[in-house]
Amino acid sequence: MTKNHSGKVALITGGNRGIGLETARQLAGLGFTVLIGVRDLAKGEAAARKLGGTVVAIALDVAAPEAAAGAAEEVQRRFGRLDVLVSNAAIHYDPSARALRPDWTTIREAFETNVFGAWRVAVAFAPLLSASGHGRLVNVSSEGGSLASMGAGAPAYSTSKATLNALTRILAAELLGSGVLVNSICPGWVATDMGGPGGRPVAQGAAGIVWAATLPDDGPTGGFFRDGKRLPW
């Protein structure tokens, strides 16, 4: 039987489309009040209306330096808690690019969202996650960030995801003992706007994120997983 999580609150960055939106759908189906953090509030509200359960759009552009702190204050004021944070917002999958012909603008933008954005969000919401006593922080990563299998191509995306994985390890260690479990999740190659056609169903990729968001208190922390199975760093 699936556990009901009514009364709990989850926030998903980049939650108005693709895998973020599907993760919101699945968590709402488990009883969570789901907040989708979006750059465009009108688009976010339109997306929220299409989902079942309790889904609310909040303004959160992770690339804006002060946005995460402002969003944390809003969540505290309106909802009083946060139990799950899914850092899903990501940009610039660049498979045809090469590190020896760098597009520095693309690389900086990728790090601003994929690393610094996730970092700022983690810092802003860590107190609420810790106060939950059972907080879950899920960094949506990619096997493209695995040093074990990394090769040529996608330099902005791969290096930013590898750095996000390093951040996962550090945050997990710093939050050890607080009840907050921190993990990186690779959803796999998913058929989204970023992944393109031909990938696995979005629902299948999102299920691995939901798994990490609903781990039991004795679940793993500081790990890298796809479909609940460990991946090499």
Image (cartoon, helix red, strand yellow):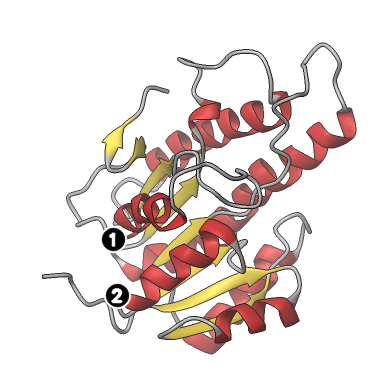
Q: Secondary structure at mark 1?
A: loop
Q: Which residue is mark 1?
A: 214
Name the residue at 47% across, 65% down: 22
Task: Provide residue 66's location: percent of width, then percent of height.
Answer: 76, 63
Name the residue at 50% across, 47% down: 140
Q: In terms of image quadrants, where is residue 60?
A: bottom right
Height in image: 101 above or below 138?
Answer: above
Q: Is 11 left or right of 101, judged from the image as shown?
A: left
| Quadrant, the C terminus | top left
Name the residue at 32% across, 45% down: 176
Distance from the alpha carbon under mark 1 to that under mark 2: 10 Å
Q: Secondary structure at mark 2?
A: loop
Q: In terms of image quadrants, where is residue 157?
A: top right
Q: Amino acid at mark 1?
A: Thr
Precedes in sequence: disc 1 or disc 2: 2
Height in image: 77 above or below 108?
Answer: below
Q: Which mark is residue 30?
A: 2
Name the residue at 67% across, 51% down: 117
